[in-house]
Amino acid sequence: MIEYIKGDITGLTPTEAVIETQAGVAYLLNISVNTFTAINESGGKGVRLYVHEIIREDAITLYGFSDIQEREIFRQLIGVSGVGSATARMILSSIAPTELQQVIVSGDVKRLKLVKGIGAKTAERIIVDLKDKIKGVDATLLLQAEATSEVFEEALAALVMLGFPKPQAQKALKRVFEAEPSAKVEVAIKKALSMM
């Protein structure tokens, strides 16, 4: 088992990273947008990516994560019936790991359904299967998650009424709440408007 790979990034897209070790071996890893952002912010030198391997008869596929928390949530997601590695990566590309924990604990099916390819049944299954497995989430975090979800929905409705396409508004609001999870409705709307 590979725990992590450390080296310099020699190739990078929002879905893949090539990391070259000091030994001169380069590994291709599938990544989420979350990890892509972290790599970009680090400058790509001396990067450590935590690895999850999927070994099949015809291929060995490596998934890379900027931190252990994201890898752990990825492993929990692929343990849910009907959620494969591509779907898990899509979820982690759409929702930051900390926010995803809050979404699952609060049972926010609506937020999970915003992820491309996730229907109501899959969203419900993820919540039912993982709600008790998510660690380190206390009652305060749960209340915060519920509040954030309501504010997100209210801000989204306002932006759509202002004439912005729903996907564009969702993307902007996602960025707002990743940076400031406790943002009020008015603040979220103003910040989202400045991004569109």
Image: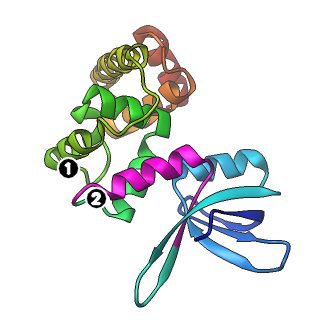
> Reading the chain from its start, which is encountered first: label 1 or label 2?
2
| Residue at disc 2, secondary structure | loop
Q: Is residue 51 toward the left or the right of residue 9 in the image?
A: left
Q: Residue at x 46, y 17 (%)?
A: 188
| Residue at disc 1, secondary structure | helix
Residue 18 picture quarter: bottom right
Relative depth, front residue between 114 and 109: 109
* Residue 76 position within the rendered picture, expressed as x and y whole percent measured from the top left: 38, 51
Residue 82 picture quarter: bottom left
Relative depth, front residue between 117 and 63: 63
Residue that mark 1 sits on: 122
Q: Which three-letter amino acid code belongs to the residue tagged 1?
A: Thr
Q: Is residue 10 toward the left or the right of residue 29 in the image?
A: right
Residue that mark 2 sits on: 83
Q: In the image, is residue 145 above or below residue 24?
A: above
* Residue 152 position within the rendered picture, expressed as x and y whole percent measured from the top left: 36, 22
Question: Label 2 near label 1: C-beta < 8 Å?
Answer: yes
Q: Which three-letter amino acid code belongs to the residue tagged 2?
A: Val
Q: Is residue 178 toward the left or the right of residue 127 in the image?
A: right
Query: How are the residues colored?
Result: rainbow
* Residue 151 position within the rendered picture, expressed as x and y whole percent measured from the top left: 35, 16
Q: Residue at x 40, y 15 (%)?
A: 144
Q: Residue furthest right?
A: 22
Stretch in magenta: 62-81
Relative depth, front residue between 71 and 26: 71
Q: In the image, is residue 177 above or below residue 187?
A: below
